[in-house]
Structures are given as structure tokens and as C-alpha cells.
Amino acid sequence: MAKLVPMPRQGNTVESCVLVGWRLQEGAAVKAQDILCDVETDKAVFEVAAGFDGTLLKLLVAEGDDVPVLQPIAVIGEAGEDWQVGANSGGVSSAATAAGGPSPDAQAAPSMSAPAPEAHRPQAAQAGAASAGVSPRARALAAKEAIRTDELAGSGPGGRVIERDIRAAIETRGPLSAAARSAAAQAGATLSPALEGSGPGGRIRLTDLEAAARPARNAAPALGAAAALSDDYLDTPIKGIRKLIAERMRDSLATTAQYTLHASAPAERLQALRARMKAAPEALGMNGVTVGDIVLYLVSRVLKDYPNCNALKLGDTLRSYARVHLGLAVDTPRGLMVPVIRNADLLSLSQISDEAKRLAAACVEGKAQPDELSGSTFTVSNLGSLGVDYFTPVINAPEVCVLGVGAILPKAITKADGSYELAPAIGLSLSSDHQVVDGAPAARFLKALCAAVADADLWISK
């Protein structure tokens, strides 16, 4: 009998996934281990296996749909079988239902039950259904370089577009100028690989993008279908993963009483420590430690004395943690992601540095696992490398605090004789939920952290 394949739950906190693309089309023979489609949450991209052998009788959702977890997405059965019989029976693939690793119960959300099958859901567009898909690495590079993947012939298994296909398209099309890259990124637009640049060496300039955005009235636009263009402005629908991130940020502000405290910490010893590590023998393994890594280390130690800041607000309960599980805000082509450095307070500086780099790379490449993206108790967001002094980070609910790390800049300080001199200082911004963390306790934590930063070299020797 035909059975339903549900949208798997990718961790207990995920309530829906966007179906990125179908790997197979209706009528295809499938094995249990065959990849049926690619889906993504607001955290990462995942592959969904068929779960059992048979024939793919029906695709129940279209590419780009935001599908609740456990809702049926396809019907698999015997060739020639009536797919609606299986859909109406409510049969579900146990193998597919079990897909996706659990996340810690600290941020668990109530499970969602599977809704009634939508037997008359429109079929996915034929072009999308026949697509072999795009690998996560290729998708990330395509987003960075504004390459349209639907115009590429994939060289991967089954015609899948892989990273080398994107790189070949970049060489064919020519590089983007800095202004063109910024404009394309802000618009979320993608460009045809056939677009010709007017700059030196075929470089695509901003004027080329503007020309491509103003085609003849009856001509297809050169920019991707996700962007609706006019002569004067660019409309980009907020959907898919960007929409999920937007909803999480809005919900965080709507359900918490957020306020932000700003301070600066002397950074002279911090910079000297970083310089010494960079110049240290490679065998010590400290060359790659950054200022951001040192701040993460210090946060993990200082938080131990401020348990109300290392906590989650779960309804009317404040759950404080003995261990520090640091969330690390990572900028990716798909948007903001927050992987977790678990038990950071037990790790050495070099271990925190290595784990931060591993998790950030996994997020950018779309390889982060569900259990690496949940369970944080405190989050750090670092915009210092972008030249930001101070900012107002949004709390990663149900956490109650988030730290924003700014740039190191010269700051006037008062000397003993009353004169002034300039010394490096790093900007720190702490957002807290006033429902559970009052201003004075938050200020004490921030003051303690500033003191630790000022004596960074002493803290790492503890």
C-alpha cells in the first residue's frame, strides 16, 4: 500500500522547513536510502531520504514551500497504484519520521502532530521536480557571487549543481565589482551566468546591474525570479529562510522586555596577548586565536559568577545553568545562524578557538547539524571586524542575555596628573530581558567582563 513521506523534524525546536528542491520526479523508482529532496530550516540545509523502496507516486508540495514538520510531502508505493489511497490512509514512513537529531530539552518546543493529508495539493512545477538540486557548498558560493543556479548544467551525480559548476560560471561571467556585489547582496538578487560586464577584464559593474534590471517591457529580466523589478526600485519578497529569521527576531522583541547597556574595556593587554599568540611557534597551536576567541573565553569564565545571565526564561520559570553553552552568531549567505560551543567554561582557549572556527565553517557551508544549532544559554555577536563601535543585539530567546562585541578603537583616558591620553578600548553591548534581569545585575556582569578583558593575560593563566 502507498505510504506518505512526512517532512522530518530537524530537532525539537524546528516547527517547519522550506523545501529547497526535489531530487526526483514522479514515477521514479526509489530505494530507501535515495535522497528525495533538500530542505532547510532557519539554521541549516538537510537531505531527506525516501525511507523505503517503491515508486514515487506523487509530490504533495512545491519547491519553495514552507512546510510544517510531519506534514506529508510525497507518496511512495507500487508502480500504477492510486496515490490518493495511500494519502487518505494516513500511512507515514517511520524511517523518515525518525530523521533529524534531537536537540537539548532546554529549548524544546511542543511537538506538532501531523495534519490531515492534502490530497489535492498542486503538483510541483515540472522543471523543479526534475531538478537534481544544488549542493549546500554550491548554494553558499552561488549566493555569495549572485549566480543563478537554474541556468547551470550540473556536473555532479544525476546532474546536481556542485561547487565546481559555480566556479566555472564565475570564470565565464566575470567577477563582480565591490559595488555590484554589495547591491546584489542587499537585493538578494541572482544574476545570469551569461551577463556580460563592461569593466576591465569583463568585470561586472553597478551600471551593468542597473542595465540588467531595466530590460525591455516584454523581455525576461536578467535578475532571478525572486526579485520583482521596476525602473526605480527592486522588490524582494521576504520568504523562505529569510522569513523564518525575521519571525524569530520579531517574536524575540515582542515577548521580551529588552534593554541594552554599553561599556568599553581597556584592550591594551588584549591586543598584546593576541600579538604574542600570533607570533608564537606553530607547534603551540595558538596562532589562529583571535580577539573574538579570547572574548568568548572570558565570557565563559565570568558568566559562572552570574547564573541569572546564563539562563533561559521558560514561561514563568528562570532556568539557570551550571555549565556555559555559548551561542556564536555567524553571518552566512543564508542569514544569521547561531551554533553552540557546549561546555565552554570547561574548554581551554585553544579549544574554544578551534570549536568556534569549526562551527562557523559548518554553518557557512550548510553542514551544521541540528544538535549543533540548539541548546545555547548565552549568545555572543561580534561586529567589531565590520567597524561597529556599539550596537543593540537582539536576544536569542528563550535566553535572557546576549553580548555584542564591537571594534577596538582609541579612547581618551584620564591619567593620574589629570591629563588625557589615548589608549585602545573595545566596545561591549549587553542586551538583557528586564522581565528577569534588572539593570543593576546586568551592569555588574558587564563591569566584571570589562575588568576581565582589561586583565586578559592574567585570566587565561588561571
Image: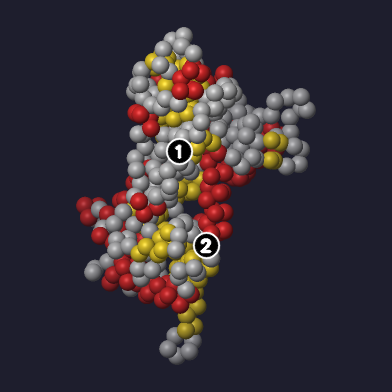
User: Which numbered disc covers residue 289?
Assistant: none
User: Which of the 4 image quadrants contains residue 172?
Assistant: top right
Q: Pick the residue in front: 368 or 52.
A: 52
Image position of 289 with respect to 258: above or below: above
Kindly report which numbered mark, 2 or 1, lies closer to the viewer in this rendering: 1
Residue at the limit of the structure toward the left, as seen here: 283
What residue appears at the point 40 percent right and 64 percent down from the top-left corner?
318
User: Which numbered disc covers residue 256?
Assistant: 2
User: Which of the 4 image quadrants contains residue 198?
Assistant: top right
The image shows residue 251 at horizontal and vertical percentages of 54, 54
Judged from the image, the secondary structure of the residue bearing numbered disc 1 is: loop
Q: Which residue corresponds to mark 1?
A: 113
Identified by mark 1, the residue type is Ser
Task: Locate residue 319 relative to residue 181 in the image: left or right.
Answer: left
Q: Pick the residue in front: 452 or 394.
A: 394
Q: CA distance from mark 2 to mark 1?
A: 28 Å
Judged from the image, the secondary structure of the residue bearing numbered disc 2 is: loop
What residue appears at the point 46 percent right and 11 percent down from the top-left corner?
81
- Mark 1 closeness class: few <14, some 14–19, many ≥20 residues within 10 Å: few
What residue appears at the point 50 percent right and 42 percent down from the top-left corner?
334
Identified by mark 2, the residue type is Thr
**Quarter of the rendering occupied by the N terminus:** top left
